Image (tube, rainbow, N blue to C red):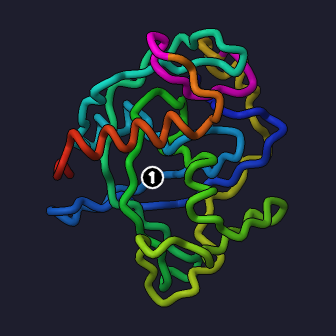
Amino acid sequence: MSAITRNRQIPSITLKTELIGKFTGRKIDANALIDSGAEGIIINGQFARKHQLTLLPIKNPFPVRNIDGSENTMGWVREYTIQKLRIYSRDGVAYHEEEAEFYVTDIGDHDIILGTDWLEEHNPDIDWSDSRVDMTRCPETCITAKPPVLHLKTKPLKPTVADPRTHHKDYQGDVVEFLSDPSTEVRKKRRSLLKTTTEEIRSQNDGNRI
């Protein structure tokens, strides 16, 4: 995964979120980029280590590759973490909460990236031009306080955006995607690997949490 995992022409919104410790209740502020040009649910490795999150090994690590199939210099994804993610509405009263499995890798200045897997699972109402996100169609596994959870708290957009190809020396393409271990056949459907890896994670780690 490169520092920026998206095509610059694909819209994105940054949410102000919290990670909440399962046992301690400790709250950690995190900026989460909703990115329709990235795959998976991803957390920054440096951010995870800074806040001493519990990182769990992936039984079958897999490489990060550019869209053209070449291997990205960020290397392999070897760890994941399970966290409780909470996102408040702008009024601070209503909120959405879920337990999410994050792949751990370098994503530059972002704390978290919520890619197409998250978008497909929660199917939020998004107004990209107004940076408005409403959580109205969440799965039953999500917790919502004072629903409907409308107008999620977002981070103001900066007036200028750095070109990702100059922002990070290891940037290798406009779009980056996860592929399977090269020792196995690469699956053609983009989400199949993530589903398979998640199932393996759940089967080999029964109850590890922060």
Whether residue 200 is situated above or below residue 178 in the rendered picture: below
User: Residue 34: where, in percent of width, then height?
Assistant: 63, 51
Whether residue 80 is situated above or below residue 82 in the rendered picture: above
- Amino acid beneath label 1: Ala
Looking at the figure, which quarter contains the N terminus?
top right
In the rendered image, residue 178 lying in the magenta stretch gets the answer: yes
Residue drawn at x 47%, y 43% is: 195
Whether residue 191 is situated above or below residue 70 in the rendered picture: below
User: Residue 58: where, in percent of width, then height?
Assistant: 30, 30
Residue 166: quadrant of the picture: top right
Residue drawn at x 47%, y 16% is: 184
From which residue to which does the magenta span run? Answer: 172-184
Please tell me how crowded label 1 is: few (under 14), some (14-19), or many (20+) other residues with Cα within 10 Å. Answer: many
**Along the line of sight, which residue is nearer the eye, 117 or 7?**
117
Q: Residue tagged by mark 1? A: 30
Q: Secondary structure at mark 1?
A: strand
User: Residue 160: where, in percent of width, then height?
Assistant: 79, 40
**Along the line of sight, which residue is nearer the eye, 198 or 150?**
198
Going by the image, does 84 lie left or right of 136? left
Residue 4: quadrant of the picture: top right
User: Residue 153: where, in percent of width, then height?
Assistant: 58, 69
Residue drawn at x 60%, y 71% is: 152
In the rendered image, residue 191 lying in the magenta stretch gets the answer: no
Going by the image, does 194 lie left or right of 47? right
Going by the image, does 199 lie left or right of 10? left
